[in-house]
Structure formats: C-alpha cells, structure tokens
Amino acid sequence: MATVSTAQLSLQSLSKEVAEWVASVAALTTPDHIHWCDGSPDEMASLRNQLIARNELQPLNAETFPDCYLARSHPSDVARVEHLTFICTPKQEDAGPNNNWMAPAEAHAEMDALYKGCMKGRTLYVVPYCMGPIDSPYSRCGVEITDSAYVVINMGIMTRMGQMALERIGRERSFVKGLHSVGELDPNRRFIMHFPEELSIKSFGSGYGGNALLGKKCHALRIASYQARTEGWLAEHMLIVGLKNPQGETHYVACAFPSACGKTNLAMLIPPGSMPGWEVFTVGDDIAWLHPGPDGRLYAINPESGYFGVAPGTGPKTNKNAFDMIRKDTLFTNVGLTANNEPWWEGIGKGEAAIDWLGKPFDAKNGPAAHPNSRFTVSAVHNPAYTAEAENPKGVPISAIVFGGRRRELAPLVYEARSWAHGVLVGASVASETTAAATGAVGVVRRDSMAMKPFCGYNFGDYWSHWLSVGAKLKHAPKVFHVNWFRQGSDNKFLWPGFGDNLRVLKWILERCVGKADAHDTAIGFLPRSEDLDTNGLSIEADTLKELLSVKDEAWRKEVVDIRAYLAEFGARTPGQLYAELETVQDRLG
Ligand code: GTP
Ligand code: SPV
Ligand code: MN
C-alpha cells in the first residue's frame, strides 16, 4: 500500500468521484507514495529541492536571477507530438480529418497497459486545479494525476491549484480527469489521448509542455472546445490584450496565431516611443474562453494563471516586458547558460552562451545554445503589463478578433473581413509555417484553421458551423481581421518591424471597430492604405509598406482554389455558408 501525504490540503470536501478515481489509478500504477498537492509556496520549494537533489533542476545565478531554475528535458522530448495525439470519440467522423482518431475502448486498453505498475518506486501527485478565476461561472476544474514533480511545479504556476479547486469540484461534482506518467520517456511509447465524452485525458511517455501540463492544451483547448460546442461558447488558442488609447478608452482584442507565431509577444507589447499615451494590458497570452454575454457582446476569460512562453527571440528590444518578467521566480526549460550561470538564448541581445541546452560546452557547430522551443514558465502577476481584469469573473468584452499566421508570402500585413461569416472563412483558411513548438519539419506552410489545427477536440467542419452559430447569437459581434507580421523580402528579412510596432496595426483595427479609420475595398476584404496606418516615427520605405499592404490577385486566385480543396476535405460537415463566402471572394478576384 502506498503511503499518503496531504500537505496543507484538507480532504474534508473531497468528492466521492475524485477519491474513487485516485484510488483506481493508484491500483493500476502502484506508486510507493501518494501526495495530494496544495500548491503552497512551501510545497513548491520542497518539490524543487527534491529535483535539485536528483540533479533534475539547477538553481540559476541567485543575484541576477533570484529564485530562477533551469530544467533540461530528455533530448527527444522537447515539443508537442501531434502525430501521437489522439481524439477518441466513439465515431471517427466526429474527430474529423483534422485529428488522429482511435476508438475509446482500444485507446483505454493501450494506455492502461502502459500505465500498469508505471509508478512503482515513484510518487503519484494529485493536482486539483481550476482553469479560470476561481469564482467565475465560466471556469472549469480538473484533477491531474502525474508522477512528475516538474509537471506539478509548472501546474502550480500555470493554474489555480489546491484547496479552492478541490472545494469547487466537491460542489460541482464534474471535473476533467487527466492521468499523466512520464513513463520511460521513450518516444516509441508516447501517446496523448483525449476522451471528450468522458471528460478525460491519458498522457504517457512525455514530460514536456503541452504533452504533460494537462490543464493547458489537453483540457483548456481539446476537451473544452468539445464541451463549448454543446454549451454554446468557444475555447480558443488566443491571447487577450487590453489597449487604452490616448483618449482613455480601453478595448480588448483576442488574437489567434499558431504556436510560436507571436501571441505572448503581442499580449504584452510595449508601445513605440512615437505613440505616446497608449497603454497595453495583458489578460492572457495563449488561451481564451469566449462566451456570449447578456448584452450581446462576446466576453473572454483567460483560463490560465501563468505563461509558458518561447524563450528564443525574447530580448530587451523585442519584448522588454517579458525580459523583465522572467528575472525572478521563473522556471526555464532547455535554455543555454552563460559562464555566470545566467540563462541564455538566441535573440537575448546580450552576453554569450557557455553551456548549451543539453548541458554540454556550447559550440555553434552543434546547433543553437537554446533549443528553438525552449521556454520559460512564470506567473502572470510578474508581467509588468498584467491587469487585474485577468481575475474578472465576467471576463472582458472583445471588440475585435484577429487571426494570423507566419507567412513569408501572400498574406498582407492586415485586412478586415466583411462580416462575421466572412471572418469565419478567413479564420478557417489560416495557413502558417510550422514551428519548433511541435516535432517535425519547421517552415512548411499548412492550413491551421483558427490556429486550432493541433487543438480542436472535434471535426473542423462542425467547428466552423459552431463559429457561425455563435456569431449569429451576438447582437454586437466583434469585427474580424487577419494579420501577418512575417512577410519576407527576397533577402529573407522581415518586411515589417513587428513587436511594439504591431500596435500601429492594432490602432487601425480599433479605429475600424468604432468607424473612425479609412480603408480600401479589395477582393479579400478591407485593407488600410499606407496613409491609413499611423507610421509617425516609423522608419520604413514607402515601397516596403506598399508591398505589405498589397493584394496580389493572381496569387490569391490560386489560394482560393487551395482553400476550396481544403474545405472539401471535411465533406458534408463543411457549412455551405463558407463556400458562399469563398464564391464572393472568387467573384471579386475575377
Ligand atoms: P506559443 O506559446 O507556442 O503558442 O507561441 P506564441 O504564439 O505565444 O509566440 P511568441 O510570442 O512566443 O513568439 C514566437 C517567436 O516569434 C519568438 O521567437 C518571437 O520573438 C517571435 N515574434 C513574436 N512576435 C514577432 C513579430 O512581431 N515579428 C517577428 N519578426 N517575430 C516575432
Ligand atoms: C504551443 O505549442 O502552442 C504552446 C506550448 O503554447 S505547449 O504548452 O507545449 O502547447
Ligand atoms: Mn500556444
């Protein structure tokens, strides 16, 4: 029998459902010890000390990076594994061509065989958590069982963990069950399975990010999107940012960009010096749960309480807020180190690496010092742009929805959809170059509808219909836009400066929302002309800006053909309205 500890957690309000599930998992996995997590600072410190004693965590320079630590994952376990991620609905067509599918009984059998005795000699941690403000009607709770102390520490930062979550589960009786074991970290024995109808997740063989922190992509996107469909809301891969203009008006914008395509950076951008009077507030950097409100507007909460952000590219020039945010109380994963025991990565803008992410002396011949998908985990309250609106149980009203992708060609800097339905087509058609956030080739353009290709827990055809139906319920639907910060010239350099200067594009977007800014009407939607954008203080060639704001009809005619073929992959599930919207674009292209 396993020994049990509960730290400061009171199990008085423990629901029968949780107790029985934990007991059944313990019987299957046979841990030596069971620890119920309370999420307290003492508990986190004790878990860190255990990892330090086992050489799995390294304290960083205590003077310059107080309470910061470095973890190195297994070198084969550095990103999400989309080819090993499954949606297990009874019917395959409900998972859709956008997902890998396995029959639930088969998936359970396969996973339970892997779990059998897998925690022998280990501790089973029970992590009760709440996604969203603890008192919000929109929040949802879960319990993750894991044998990884690293996962517990991350969940402690990324979610509201402990007593309050356990009590809410006790009242609601419904919660998402997430079972996770690192197994042997064998890439050949690694699976991330989702059972949306059972509200359960089974993950084995990885300790990394979205594969292992089950509250994040597994619960807050794959399971939640499935629930959201039946309940009339949306669970999306979106940042939420508040923008206060010099007149003192604040608007909130939700933006869906694929992984490693700029959400964290946009969510905490610093206005350029030539745009005085603007203020930026971060509500969320990765996930938004959106609900139609009583006033006919769309309201967003951020289900997370921390950021699991991409380290490379984060420097004082690109993202000073993030750079300042991660100087204390931060957990780094797979970054390099300076001779001074400070974290280092490509794009940090100062110092140099002495040790690479594998722990070896750095030699540029062997590749980058930091893994391209190296990350920091940090509490949202450390963000200089944090706003207490992130705790607002009602969420914040959304004025604009912005889709985007990483495309060296074709997609202009920004354009506006003509209507909600056209916006759903624009979102469904998002295409982007793959990044290091998932294993596999990098830089390959693929369709990534609403930036949800790896995260939608059901058939995209049904998902697009759901988007259309949510819009139909909104008296004041947000306007929908598309942006691309990543257009490149023939020299492979980015045409647009990006980062803080993206506020210039957001300004035009907000002015469009209140009917103040001008635009010209193109085949694909409304675009600003050069003079419609605030370029005061921006050094950019007139021709470059013109190029960024151009629509190439010939290339777009090809794109339309490609989009139609993509929509057709979803057969009869694709809503006819999307084809009608595509026809309109095609007619306008001539
Ligand atoms: P996930 O956490 O994987 O969902 O990523 P994300 O969408 O939050 O992306 P993030 O903001 O972390 O940016 C990913 C990479 O793109 C980093 O290396 C950034 O430095 C870079 N990046 C972000 N914004 C811009 C931009 O406006 N222009 C350019 N050129 N690069 C950017
Ligand atoms: C992403 O890949 O979109 C991330 C990182 O935000 S992960 O938590 O691994 O999903
Ligand atoms: Mn993400």
Image: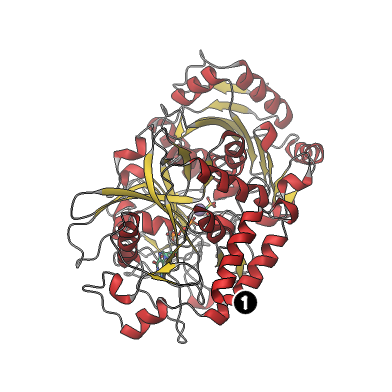
Asked if 169 appears above or below 251 in the picture, the reply is above
Measuring from the top left, give residue 227's x and y in whole percent. Answer: 60, 36
Residue under numbered circle 1: 558
Asked if 49 appears above or below 437 in the picture, the reply is above
**Three-letter amino acid code at the position of disc 1:** Lys
Residue at image location 55% in from the left, 31% down from the top: 142
Q: Secondary structure at mark 1?
A: helix
Nearer-the-camera pick, 436 or 150: 436
Rendering colour mode: secondary structure
Q: Is residue 237 left or right of residue 566?
A: left
Q: Is residue 78 visible?
A: no
Snapshot quadrant of residue 548: bottom left
Q: Is residue 47 left or right of residue 77?
A: left
Q: Quadrant of the C terminus?
A: bottom right
Measuring from the top left, give residue 38's x and y in whole percent. Answer: 46, 27
Measuring from the top left, give residue 82's x and y in whole percent. Answer: 65, 55
Measuring from the top left, give residue 56's x and y in whole percent. Answer: 52, 48
Mark 1 sits near ligand 1, with its Cβ under 8 Å away: no
Asked if 328 appears above or below 260 in the picture, the reply is above
Residue at image location 33% in from the left, 70% down from the top: 349
Q: Is residue 419 left or right of residue 31?
A: left
Nearer-the-camera pick, 482 or 314: 482
Nearer-the-camera pick, 70 or 482: 482
